[in-house]
Image: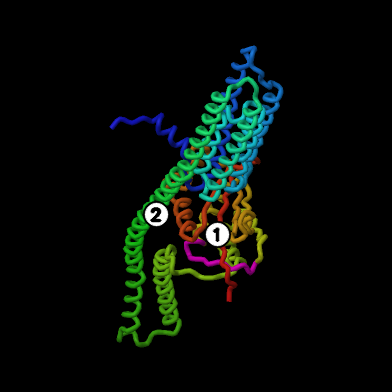
Amino acid sequence: MRQFPGLNRLAAWLIPVQSGDTSLTRQGLQRLLLLRAFVTGASCAGLFALMLFPGLDVPGGFIAGLVAAIVVSILLGYWHLNLSRPIGNTELFLHILVDVVFLVLLLLNTGGVGNPLISYLLVLLAVTATLLPRAFVNSFAVGSILIYTFFLLLDLSAEQNMPGMSGNAQDMFELHLVGMWVIFVVSAVLITVFISAMAIAVRDREHHLAEARENEMRNEQLVAIGTLAAGTAHALGTPLSTMAVILNDLDDPERENLEGDSVKQEIGLLREQVSRCKHSINQLIRYYHKDDPSARERVTLARFAADIQDYILNVHPAARVEFKLAAEPETPLDVEPSLRHAVINIIENGIKAARKTVDVDYALDPEDARNLLISVTDDGPGIPEEVLERIGEPFVSRRKDSMGLGIFLANAALRRAGGNIEMFNRQAGGALTLIRLPLTSEAVS
């Protein structure tokens, strides 16, 4: 089957899909700003062409001021994109409403419902239906219909007071305007119903694909457990053989007159071999249970943070990692082993990338106080753009010596717990990783 890479890239641009760190709303805002710039440029070209006709009264001064305001809004939008913080649905909706305000101001001064640009409301409705939940879509659909109705009534009132138009011609023109309004309303309803449903279906499909990838990775982990079990059995062979030899020596009737120091030495060696066996078995048990969702434990945020801090400081004593707890220490949290492992993995990634320091902050999510927000900041070189777009997918890493499974597995563990990961490059240099985890409503007993 023939491939069309250009069309594939266009589809990827028009329909952003969440991938790991890059949020759907952030991608949507990028597309919206580009769309705003394109529509503004095309409209300016069209209005400039109209100004060439001497009989048309085009409010050039007003349009110039409006274009300047739109350019400022685009620059502010890109500044917003460069901030090292997440973009929520409400913020994206407000950016879409900015387009609506500019469009309404333009229509008020350039013909109202007779201006073809009024149909741009349908484009903005389609963008809203693609990117935002149903509540935002319904609100925008109702608002766009009310805006069109307002301009329709305004134009109908103006037509009634217009001299020089026969009654029949006026009736036909009013019928034409009402017909356009009906088509607009039907189009808005169809977009609200069908495009919203299609967008939800696409998101569900991506969710199911992510679950399938997780299941595939879990199957690979089962194979890894089998390999680890075989290695553990091999590792147990040497100490068990040593213990068997020592026990045979102790049970040898020809060595009944063993001295106390010799016996203590043999017993010490036995204990050492038993410790080796226990260590090998515990490694296997820890690996087996690290992704078990049933192994959840309700702990306080202070204990969760302390466990992670102790691990990092013990395993990476030379690293400069600053921990800060800005939330209530007794905040309850449901934790499974894989969650600790996920957070530790992300902090270790920051340590490997950092030039000097890594900052780990625990706080409540400013957008939703029911979530814990863990910020991991490093002062490294940052994440290359080609890697940043695909981080969270398997076998993608910013380090050449890594298989690229750490962030993927961490993201999978956090999603199972109802959380997520977002990653950004900081303007001051380095990378910022945001981890969200849902908090528990009940206190720790």
Residue 276 magenta-drawn? no
Observer able to see residue 378: no
Q: Who comes first in sequence, dot 2 or dot 1? A: 2
Residue identified by numbered label 1:
437
Q: Residue at x 47, y 48 (%)?
A: 392
Color encoding of the figure: rainbow
Image coordinates for residue 89, horizontal then vertical, percent: 57, 48
Q: Which residues are magenta?
A: 329-339
Q: Residue at x 58, y 36 (%)?
A: 148
Image coordinates for residue 160, horizontal then vertical, percent: 63, 29
Q: Residue at x 66, y 18 (%)?
A: 57
Image coordinates for residue 347, horizontal then vertical, percent: 55, 54
- Which secondary structure, mark 1? strand
Q: How many marks?
A: 2
Quadrant placement of the N terminus: top left
- Which secondary structure, mark 2? helix
Q: Residues within 10 Å of mark 2 (few under 14, many from 20)?
A: some
As drawn, the label of residue 382 is: none
Quadrant placement of the C terminus: bottom right
As drawn, the label of residue 211 is: 2
Q: Amino acid at mark 2?
A: Glu
Observer able to see residue 183: yes
**In the displayed structure image, the side of residue 274 where residue 356 appears, left or right:** right
Q: Nearer the viewer, residue 129 or 68?
A: 129
Q: Amino acid at mark 1?
A: Leu
**In the displayed structure image, the side of residue 219 where residue 321 appears, left or right:** right
Q: Nearer the viewer, residue 17 or 137?
A: 137
Proximity of marks 2 and 1: CB atoms separated by less than 8 Å: no
